[in-house]
Image: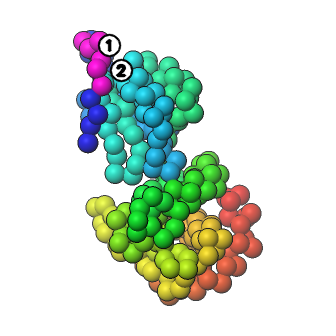
Amino acid sequence: MYLEVPMEKQHKETIMLNITAEEKKTLKGRGYIMSKDGEHFVARIITVDGTLTDAELLKIAEASRKFGSGKVALTSRMTVEVQGLTYENLEPFNEFIAEAGLYTGGTGARVRPIVPCKGTVCVHGLIDTQGLARELHETFYKGWYDIALPHKFKIGIGGCPNNCVKPGLNDFGIMGWKGGYRIFVGGIWGKKQRPGTLIDRVFTKDEVFEMLERCLLLFMELADGKERFGAMIDRIGVENFLAQLEAGDVMDRKSQILAR
């Protein structure tokens, strides 16, 4: 989906970039991803809970007009990409959107932005999906941002069993349930697919946070190189993993795991 924004001017000059692969990687880690033309970037703006205010939307539109191509793309994981930025405009763009409290990110081998459905306002919603997303964002997206994981780690929140956001296809999926929350672990959706393993009991919100932290620590401790979380679970055995997850003794090793 695209939102067309009137442009102040067209980019007529073609400038071939001469930046290193390491710099491209660093920029991508900040949410500035090179386009396939090798000349321009998209800037991936985070939405904390899948929503934006009118002021934030206007700021993004203005930033697109001022620094980009005038096109804004909505990603499948509820981030917003401003297209057509030049290398020279990346830092001015970053400063401009920061005036509205906006920032880029959402890439790399780390906890990715949280993806909630609209369960907070949906007639079928059993939990406050957007409120939970904001809490998880602070604790795990921002709180774990500088912690390198073996691979990307995606978190999805569905407000009810209708499954619109498909939490079971995330590394850690949360589903609203009567009386609490259900949890899926190890879901993968991409070149390879793996349905998430359902932990067969209902959790409180505090337990969701505890289980998520245990999952991240076990992932760091047990993954083989750049292994996806679901692949790790299958390699060591589902029952083995669930037993370790439920035991929770990984929390006793937290400081050693994070210090690696």
**Picture coordinates of residue 51 (x, y %)?**
46, 46
Q: Which residue is mark 1?
A: 8
Earlier sequence position, callout 2 versus callout 1: 1
Q: Secondary structure at mark 2?
A: helix
Q: Report the side of 242 relative to 67 (left or right).
A: right
- Label placed on residue 65: 2
Q: Amino acid at mark 2?
A: Arg
Examine the residues drawn in magenta and state their main secondary structure. loop
Disc count in the image? Answer: 2
Depth check: give the residue in front, 26 or 8: 8
Residue 182 visible in the displayed image: no
**Picture coordinates of residue 175 (x, y %)?**
46, 72
Q: Which residues are magenta?
A: 5-12
Depth check: give the residue in front, 76 or 185: 76
Residue drawn at (39%, 40%) of the image: 80
Q: Which class describes the residues within 10 Å of circle 2: few (<14), some (14-19), or many (20+)?
A: many
Residue 7 visible in the displayed image: yes
* Location of the C terminus (image quadrant): bottom right
Q: Secondary structure at mark 1?
A: loop
Rendered position, 166 above or below 8: below
| Residue 11 is inside the magenta segment | yes
Rendered position, 87 above or below 141: above
- Label placed on residue 80: none
| Residue 193 is inside the magenta segment | no
Depth check: give the residue in front, 39 or 23: 39
- Give yes or no for contact between labels 2 and 1 (Cβ–Cβ under 8 Å): yes
